[in-house]
Amino acid sequence: MAGHGASKVSAEGVLATFPELRDIEDASLRDIVIEIWQEVLDESDWERLEDVPKHPHKLPASSNLVDHTRTVTQMAVAVAEAAERVRGIGYDRDQLIANANLHDVSKLLEFEPTPEGGQGSRFGHLIQHGAYGAHKMWQKNLPMEMVHSVLAHTLTSRYVPQTWEAVVVHYVDYLDSDALNLQHGVPLNIRK
Ligand SMILES: [Fe+2]
């Protein structure tokens, strides 16, 4: 566990993997986000964040979770900036970056490594997607609105996002997912 012996990844390593986290101004929030990645990686069977797939069966292993997380975080900030510039809609930049960065951290436990790259784990079969990331955030006393954003980001949650930050993360997550699905000839999430 973080703070007790060596983690699989250092705090600097997490920052190098997710440079977007450097834009979180509140140093204590940034440290908590880093700690969550370290702790969940240590709890998982993965050795490196770079090895975790975005989705083990649907997409090739080259579509990894790190690139998805980074794209979603950058997209979230870009969308919130545009809506603020044109419409004057305010948002909490630190919280938006942290929510977007942590939205899929639970995949470290929901998937497990195999020689082929990875597969769904028993954890992922039993515990709803996103719930563990939300649990870690709550455990570290992050605001309920942030916990909500991670819990509600997925269509597997019956709860509809209730804050602007949560709405943005939800849409850009599916936007980047469908960018990958389109690229790889996999059916889109869009339903009509
Ligand atoms: Fe997700």
Image (cartoon, rainbow, N blue to C red):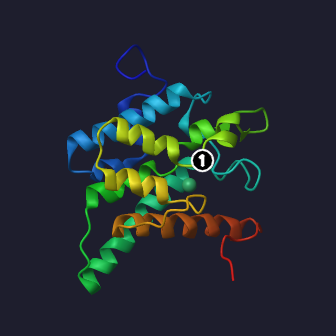
Tell me if residue 27 comes above or below residue 47 in the rendering: below
Where is residue 157 shown, x and y percent of the image?
55, 58
Label 1 beta carbon less than 8 Å to ligand 1: no
Please tell me in which quadrant of the rendered image residue 182 appears: bottom right
- In depth, the one of 189 and 148 nearer the eye is 148
- In depth, the one of 182 and 167 nearer the eye is 167
Tell me if residue 160 comes above or below residue 7 in the rendering: below
Residue drawn at x 27%, y 85% as measured from the top left: 87
Tell me if residue 167 comes above or below residue 59 in the rendering: below
- Kind of residue indicated by mark 1: Gln
Tell me if residue 153 comes above or below residue 189 in the rendering: above
Q: Give SS at disc 1.
A: loop
Q: Image check: 90 left or right of 134?
A: left
Where is residue 73 shown, x and y percent of the image?
42, 59
Please tell me in which quadrant of the rendered image residue 80 appears: bottom left
Q: Image check: 101 left or right of 178?
A: left
Q: Which quadrant: the C terminus?
A: bottom right
Where is residue 133 shown, x and y percent of the image?
47, 43
Residue drawn at x 48%, y 67% as measured from the top left: 160
Q: What residue sits right under mark 1 in the picture?
A: 128
